[in-house]
Amino acid sequence: MIPELGHFALILALVLSLVQAVVPLVGAHRNSSALMGVGRPAAQGQFFFILFSYVCLTWAFIQSDFSVQLAASNSHSATPLMYKITGVWGNHEGSLLLWAMSLSLWTVAVTVFSRHLPDAFLARVLGVLGWVSAGFISFTLVTSNPFDRLLPAVAEGRDLNPLLQDPGMIIHPPLLYMGYVGFSVAFAFAIAALMSGRLDAAWARWSRPWTTVAWVFLTAGIAVGSGWAYYELGWGGWWFWDPVENASFMPWLLGTALIHSLAVTEKRGAFRSWTVLLAIGAFSLSLLGTFLVRSGVLTSVHAFATDPKRGLYILALLVIVIGCSLFLYAMRAPRLAGGGSFGFVSRETALLGNNVLLTVASASVLLGTLYPLFLDALNLGKISVGPPYFEAVFVPLMTPVVVLMMFGPFLRWKDDDLAAAVRKVAPAFIASVLIGFGTAWAVDHVTWRTVLGLALSAWVVLASIQLLVVRLKERAGASAGSRLRSITASWWGMWLAHFGVGIFIIGVTLVGSLDQNIDVKMKEGQRAELAGYTFLFRGALDADGPNYDAARGIIELSRDGRALGTLTPEKRVYRAQGMPMTEASLDIGVFRDVYVTLGEQLPDGAWIVSLYYKPFISWIWMGCLLMGLGGVFAASDRRYRRLAAREATAGAGQRAAASA
Amino acid sequence: MKARSKRLMLVGGGVVLLVAAVALVLSAFQQNLVFFHTPTEVAEGRAPTGKTFRVGGMVEEGSIAREPDGITVRFAITDTAKVIPVTYQGTLPDLFKEGKGAVVQGKLEGGVFQATEVLAKHDENYMPPEAAHAVEQAQKAAQTLSQ
């Protein structure tokens, strides 16, 4: 009964999403406030029904109701409660429902926090979001109904893929989806602005906090996913350039370009067309990511061709979204010409340069991800594009991005003197080149990549410090406290996020240059050495869990005779699917991780043990954390709320004047 | 400088940057493609020597053997028609098993494939597409021969 209620609620949500898609747009067209007013309650009602539907599905998992096909394939009565709940989205159908729910949540947030927007504009935003929502809910209902029954019911479920039974997987998908789907708000704002022909600084200012928040979610989602891959996949890598990862990285790159382009549009009125295209692009890449991950093309393009219903549906959705929005853009673009002019040497130029580079980077990931699929689909042979390609592309593309990223903030808007600006940052630049060489020499690893990485991170750190000093000196005479207070939250956000990039590069460079790894055969009581650490193998014992059998290795870690604790890597076999899993054990530190996995047991009773030394790897995630935090600061700037309040009063005044 | 020529410079600079970046991407792409070959192709000498490529197929039954050091593994990959011997140093993926699909990446040296990377399936139902493809090709070829 409960699954049927959930199914029915989802159908009601579809109906409401169609109401939300049609009525407010008609209202905005006819200038009827009654019709426009329908958008808000429709969006909120839709959220209620999707949430209800989602809770029903979760209930089937918690109750181990294996008459529901989805629960039978992705849960097990012995699965811990937490993984029963997260198992809901550990599959195609459930994750689509999560997608629809995130979209609905974003829409409700728009109805709550954008009360100050002009009625017609809000109505158009909600209308666009309604169409996206209708597309996804109907996709779920037509091709991937999560409430399908399995009759007769099976006695026991097949359990959730063991790789997904991990705390990282509890938060990774919701964060990532909130990021993906969040770009639909930026998209809806751009489309609404195109419709109303009002593509101005005000539009950019309304759109900015939403886009930034979506970007923060995406950043956090990607970082958590990478952390999960690092400790769960059991071989110590943190990024694999896997198509599934690329699917989330492409919208991130374009989204990063978008938040910077929006800044220029808001402050200077320039780049308007470009910003709109980026908003359309970032959302399209989010949809493409969903298509890649969810249609099955990655597993096999031929499997996709034999059961094309799902893939074709998302592909059609993608074509409609891109087609309609580009058509609308083409209709309106001629009216957009103009905007703030700027000189060759200006902050605008620096931001434009980075925008171009980030877009090319995004396109290069697209090429590397899609080209093998195309070749395969056309039966032109099988190729794979691996990390070497992406590394060969990203190092030269991102180097100028990082240099410009710290140079841009020193430039004035509109026009500046190149020689003067270069003189300002030259000491920091020269110092960072020297630091790059010096540190690489100090860690005894002088390769061009290490030197470059270290020099770039030194440049970010030094230029950040200089930038802060310059900013504080701007108000000479004021007290230190008031100078600090005079800095806006959005400035701190920019500063923190850029600083985070520097921390990130330190991590990437040092772990890439200095990590060490050996596989050793170890018997009970044997020792192994790696990077100055001693590993004493105390044997392996049985450590069965609720839904798996496991052998747990006991390894005592010490350095120079000082004990550092015991590592307990496990080799598990999940009973339901008979699937083996390697569970790594880590000794996490600020400057290095020690990472151990248990391989297989050999006939003579010895075990193969993999030992890893990973210097500075946690700096990668610290960097991401700072970038995300920067986004939070930027989005929370008081300016957005103050202006919002002013516009609301102004709007109310206008309305009052109109009715008078 | 006039506004017009400033604009030209800006557009010109942008285009130069774009062209350089695209050229970089395409050349990196060209140099780093990893091609896939079936064991039959490798056996017939149609795979490059000294260049990294991928071979996919099934791990032959009874072929996995460890050297005394416990770390070096020897096994064979087959598409049911031809068998390619492989050596690999390191930990094998969890789902690497005899009789199951696997893909190896590395170089061919003296008739033995020196693998630097071994990929197996992600879960019970998933077969690496390249492995499935290799077996399919070999079986198609066998059918045409028997006809």
Image: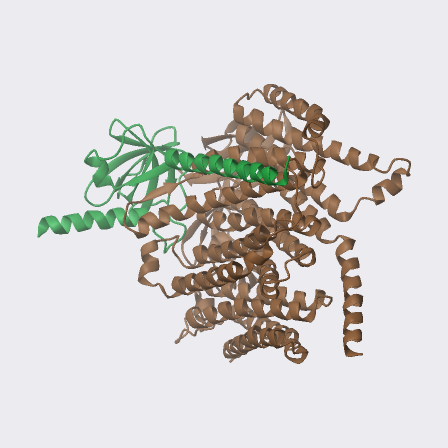
Chain colours: A brown, B green
Give the camera-side residue of A259 and B126.
Answer: A259
Q: Position of residue A550 (x, y in %)?
A: 48, 49
**Quarter of the image where one finds residue A600:** top left
Left/right placement of residue A575 relative to residue A489 reads left
Q: Residue at x 53, y 51 (%)?
A: A251
Count of numbered marks: 0
Q: Residue at x 34, y 63 (%)?
A: A307
Q: Please, is residue A424 above or below residue A246 in the view? A: above
Q: Residue at x 46, y 42 (%)?
A: A364
Residue furthest to the left: B147
**Quadrant for the C terminus of chain A in the image:** bottom right
Can residue A77 be seen by looking at this rendering?
Answer: no
Q: Position of residue A114 (x, y in %)?
A: 70, 65
Left/right placement of residue A66 relative to residue B125 reads right
**Quarter of the image where one finds residue A606:** top left
Give the camera-side residue of A580 and A430.
Answer: A430
Can residue A390 be seen by looking at this rendering?
Answer: yes
Q: Position of residue A150 (x, y in %)?
A: 41, 73
**Quarter of the image where one finds residue A121:** bottom right
Left/right placement of residue B27 relative to residue B41 reads right
Q: Please, is residue A389 above or below residue B69 in the view? A: below
Q: Position of residue A111 (x, y in %)?
A: 67, 69
